Amino acid sequence: MKDIDAEYITEWDREWYYHPRPFETLEWLEIDPDSRGEQVLSALLAVGIRPEKTGELIRIVGWIRPAEPKPDQH
């Protein structure tokens, strides 16, 4: 999981009772769906979440950083 206010990525954790919090500053989180990849993707799509699949992991982006401004080209 990556928080927009943090300079680091959290360690892997399978305990979801208290994670992820706070939702408002969630940049992204990754899910390791084990053998249930298609089920997880279907469930996310069913509730309107557009996940990214990166290898075996599923990434959910919660906040997109604004693009860097382009330097003047004079």
Image: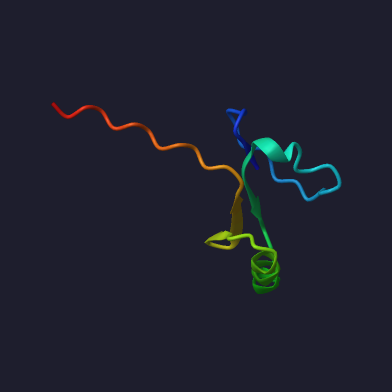
Coloration of the structure image: rainbow
Q: Position of residue 71 (x, y in %)?
A: 25, 28
Q: Is residue 16 above or below residue 34?
A: above
**Dividing the picture into quarters, in which one does residue 8 lie?**
top right
The residue lying at 81 percent from left, 49 percent from top is 16
Q: Residue at x 78, y 50 (%)?
A: 14
The picture places residue 41, in percent across and down from the top left corner, at 64, 68
Q: Quadrant of the C terminus?
A: top left
Tell me if residue 72 comes above or below residue 64 in the rendering.
above
* Residue 45 in which image quadrant: bottom right
Tally of marks: 0
Identify the image quadrant of the N terminus: top right
Residue farthest to the left? 74
Name the residue: 61% across, 46% down: 62
Q: Is 29 rendered above or below residue 50?
A: above
Residue 49 % position (x, y): 63, 60
The residue drawn where x is 53% and y is 62% is 55
| Residue placed furthest toward the right | 17
- Give the side of residue 66 with respect to residue 31, left or right: left
Residue 34 horizontal/vertical position (percent): 69, 65
State which quadrant residue 20 falls in: top right
- Where 33 sits versus 63, above or below? below
- Residue closest to the eye, 1 or 43: 43
